[in-house]
Amino acid sequence: MASRYIANTPEEQKRMLDVIGAASLEDLLVRIPAKARLPRALGIPAAIAETDLIRHMKALAARNADADTHVCFMGAGSYDHYVPSPISHLISRGEFFTAYTPYQPEASQGTLRTIYEYQTMIAELTGMDVANASIYDGASSLAEAALMAHASTGRNEIAVSHAVNPLYKRVTATYCEGPRVRLRDAAAPEGVTDLAAAKKAVGPKTAALVIQTPNFYGCLEDVAAAAEVAHAAGALLVVVADPVNLGVLEGPGKLGADIVVGEGQGLGVPMSFGGPNLGVFAAKSELVRRMPGRLVGVTVDRDGERGFVLTLQTREQHIRRAKATSNICTNVALCALMATIYLATLGRRGLVRVGELSAAKAHYAAERLAKVPGVSLRFAAPFFKEFALKLPKPPERVAARLARQGFLAGVPLKSFDRSLGDCLLVAVTEKRAKAEIDAFAAALEKAVA
Amino acid sequence: MSAGAYDKLIFELSSPGREAFSLASADVPEADVRKILPEKHLRRDAPALPEVSEFDVVRHYSRLSRMNYGVDTHFYPLGSCTMKYNPKINEDMARLAGFARLHPLAAEAVAQGALQVMHELARDLSEIAGMDAVSLQPAAGAQGELAGVLMIRAYHESRGEKRTKVLVPDSAHGTNPASTAIAGYEVVEVKSLPNGEVDVDALGRVLGIDVAAFMITVPNTLGMFEPRIVEITELCHAKGVQVYMDGANLNAILGITRPGDLGFDVCHFNLHKTFTTPHGGGGPGAGPVGVKAHLEPFLPVPVVTKDGDEYALDWKRPKSIGKLQAFWGNFGMLVRAYTYIRTMGPDGLRSVSDNAILNANYIMKRLETDYDVAVPGPCMHECVLSARRQKKLGVTATDIAKRLLDLGFYAPSTYFPLIVEEALMIEPTETEAKETLDAFCDAMIQIARETETNAAVIHDAPVTTPVRRLDQTKAAREPNLRWTPRA
């Protein structure tokens, strides 16, 4: 049977079999024991022609409330930021899109150069010395940071602020199961980490203190004070940060972080129902040989010309096997390329502008929404582009009602934290117009009345 | 124009004052961030990002792309990587706004289409692999391995068994021992027979009550089907050992045989290999993991469920190993793989493996006189050659790889598997036409001739690429991992 993705015709197959000296395709399968063979066709749906398939897929896509059909105020780790048009066009070039990991550097200079640019941009934004070529997503980046802190300090506990994204904690706990690294919770009762509680959670067994800023509730953390707490106990400070905010917010490295991780989806990567995302990972230079993932460095070729290669590979699984710093192999290089093109496009002034506009619109929205009768801001701490609203009616029901009116109202916090069951987490990016915010406030007012 | 003439980084194009972005001005009353936020959180200076125009960006990255070989432009016979054609319709479908612009925490009621894609894809992958359940969450093969080994660990612990070791053949992908070690196991390497097959007697001697799992690749990394595989999985089960299949080579067996039917308890899928999602220069991939029923309670949360016509995310799974990614998996890749499976159907998938096997055997046959074959055929979807004969004349597998770049081909995998001297691992995939295979074989034969008559041209290679051979030692000794302005 013919497939448009397979060139071999029956005549060509016959000629190839003749060269091989086999009578049929079946002759090539002699090593597979008869009892191991599948005696029937696979029980999956029959092939569909392209036009019918497109109709089917469009019908499925239409059953989802996306950020084109709805005004998006959802965040909690995935945001509706501006995506400049060149990104999709450039990453779609087959030379980028269909290349493998740059194991033959002479035929992969395009990918290697973009990764080197990416490393430079991320190091600059996070205020760190060195960034890797990417991890899967923000959560797995944090998990890798926890394992790296464990390996570099020889200590077995990680203190994690209660205000770190609960999904990230869940992933970190999964990765820490094997090496038996224990996670300890540092309370954040008023929307920010209680540093006195953090001090108690951090001790001689602590490999790292983890905070997130802005944290899961959108509030800004005192990174410098957290660094003092961690360092006083000989632990590392790991900061989870969203790089799209770092045009305005100080790079955590400048405030004392030893490792900065985060979700880079805001840098031009589609939300895509949560993946693929972009795990950002940056560290101080003294930790570079313990870093997970790929690194690209500069070198010269035989003629002395500048060239780029994967380097410090003795950290990696294909060389070091069971003793590697991580098992990561395939990463999210193409998402890192999206981020690189995004940061090149936004540039020095654009990223600052994105941060300023997001903060300004979020603060306008917070003020406007808190004026809705019965609605208030849950936390008093300074926030950036996201905030928790306390509602007089169950947030799940309010959000469902607003979805029917064209708003993705925010993320109900009940499933993340039972004590915040009456709260809705609302995110506002630079894309939201004042008119959209005003309409949202009006719809909310009716929904909670 | 030679792509090699270009030697710029984006930072080196920067000209103060240029802009490439378009953002509306603030339409809210207070837009001064210094009045809104406390000073201590704010950056003092704008970040040192480039200042370029939009056209600067477009031309720069277009030119960089031309310094790459990709599957769209070059034959890419990289063994174990399944560099097949990535269908364009997959891209159009993944970019539909209903998928690409869907927030991961959108309520289930307004994400039914996305959940349906996931549910049906998991069902299809279960059928393809003969497994009872599939989690789509792992982001790549290595994460699928970690999930699989953690499930095995949770399973043994749930039965009150403390097993401490995982057996991995010496021919395994590096991720196998690395993932196993992260899951908290001692990795015990099992020597393979010279032909790459499992030494069943040696395996029998190390299988014991302290062994949690045996992890193998089928077909193995020499491109051969393991003829005693059913016996091996039975032997393992008799000792309470779980058997894990690395699914990197699944492209060889679609509709021919199924890991579940061979006795495997767990296997992962590389959607970026077998199911045509693009490699993107190193990712993203997707590494779903399939399990038999006894491991199902341990699957990562949440699991996509279907009740009547409604799809949901099930979080109430107390025995779950937890989460691997913040959200549900690399959904964009799942849409592509789903599109591909629907395009191909059962007969199409079967013809994938038939033609992948045919193409590999054709290459092996055409090259068997000029190169040493690691194991005599027939092979499955890839073949492993050894350049040991060429090495005696001073030409290594690396040299051959570099010469191939000059002749217009990406290189095979080299020096893998580790058990073959000067290994050249060639995987043509089913999507390459006979004339491409012939051109590649002609080039390989030409290199074998040059080894004897004109080795200098091989040692000089590559000369047609943007750069020539690169000094790896210098890069590692003097790490320069970020750009700084030239003084």
Image (tube, rainbow, N blue to C red):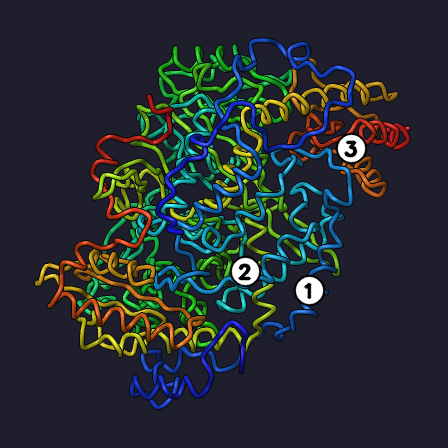
| As drawn, B68 above or below A270 | below
Q: Are marks 1 and 3 on the same chain?
A: yes
Whether the residues at callouts 3 and 2 have beta carbons within 8 Å, the answer is no
Q: Nearer the viewer, residue A434 or B171?
A: A434
Residue farthest toward the front in the current orientation of the protein: B1
Q: Secondary structure at mark 3?
A: helix
Q: Is residue A442 left or right of residue A381?
A: right
Q: Residues within 10 Å of mark 3 (few under 14, many from 20)?
A: many
Image quarter of residue A25: bottom left
Residue B61 pos. (x, y %): 48, 43
Chain assignment, label 1: A
Q: Are marks 1 and 2 on the same chain?
A: no
Whether the residues at callouts 1 and 2 have beta carbons within 8 Å, the answer is no
Chain assignment, label 2: B
- Report the disc number at residue B99: none
Residue B261 pos. (x, y %): 44, 72
Q: Is residue A353 left or right of residue A239?
A: right
Q: Quadrant of the C terminus of chain A?
A: top right
- Report the disc number at residue A54: 1
Residue B83 pos. (x, y %): 41, 62
Amino acid type at circle 1 is Ile
Amino acid type at circle 2 is Ala
Give the spatial CA distance, label 1 vs label 3: 36 Å
Residue located beneath label 2 in the image: B133
Residue at point 53% right, 26% down?
Answer: A241
Q: Residues within 10 Å of mark 1 (few under 14, many from 20)?
A: some
Give the spatial CA distance, label 3 vs label 2: 33 Å
Nearer the camera: disc 1 or disc 2: 1
